[in-house]
Amino acid sequence: MLIDKLAAGVVRVQTAIGPRYLMPSFLQRVYFLWMFRNFPILPQVVLSKTQQRLIDRMCAEQRFVSMAYADGLDDAPVIGTVERRPAIGAEPLPPRRPVVSEGSSLAAEARQRS
């Protein structure tokens, strides 16, 4: 199985519109085998900057494999899967108000009462 992945493996990229399959070069396949040595699926946010740039560059170069791999017709071995889904709650949070300490608010109440 490892030899099959090394010879003709593809990398699955899960996107919001569905899976895409990248065909890496031989050296890239070796690198991806090392990258996915412990986990078959990795979110893109846990990858190093170098690994993220490699995935982004391959996607930008349109190095996608035909849809025959997606249907399982050619049964190309999948080296690993990268999840490229937008983060939930990616909208920025509203600015926080400063915290008022209890001591200063109690002192202000005492001054108002006297």
Image (cartoon, helix red, strand yellow):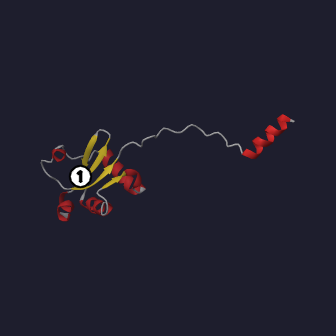
- Classify residue 91 as left or right of residue 14: right
Q: In the displayed structure, would residue 38 be above or below residue 99? A: below
Which residue is at 12% across, 47% downward? 73
Q: Position of residue 37 (x, y in %)?
A: 30, 63
Q: Nearer the viewer, residue 60 or 86?
A: 86
Q: In the displayed structure, would residue 56 be above or below residue 97? A: below
Which residue is at 21% across, 47% downward? 65
User: SS for tag 1?
Assistant: loop
Residue 33 quadrant: bottom left
Q: Position of residue 101 (x, y in %)?
A: 72, 45
Which residue is at 13% across, 50% downward? 74
Q: Amino acid type of disc 1?
A: Met
Task: Pick out the residue farthest to the left.
Answer: 73
Task: Pick out the residue farthest to the right.
Answer: 114
Q: Position of residue 99 (x, y in %)?
A: 67, 43
- Classify residue 49 as left or right of residue 98: left
Task: Pick out the residue farthest to the front.
Answer: 113
Q: Nearer the viewer, residue 26 or 102?
A: 102
Disc 1 designates what residue?
23
Residue 112 quadrant: top right
How many callouts does the rendering have?
A: 1
Q: Quadrant of the C terminus?
A: top right
Q: In the displayed structure, would residue 106 be above or below residue 34? A: above
Q: Counting other residues with Cα less than 10 Å from the Cα at mark 1, is it few (<14), some (14-19), or many (20 or more)?
A: some
Q: Nearer the viewer, residue 25 or 98?
A: 98
Q: Quadrant of the N terminus?
A: bottom left
Q: Position of residue 68 (x, y in %)?
A: 15, 45
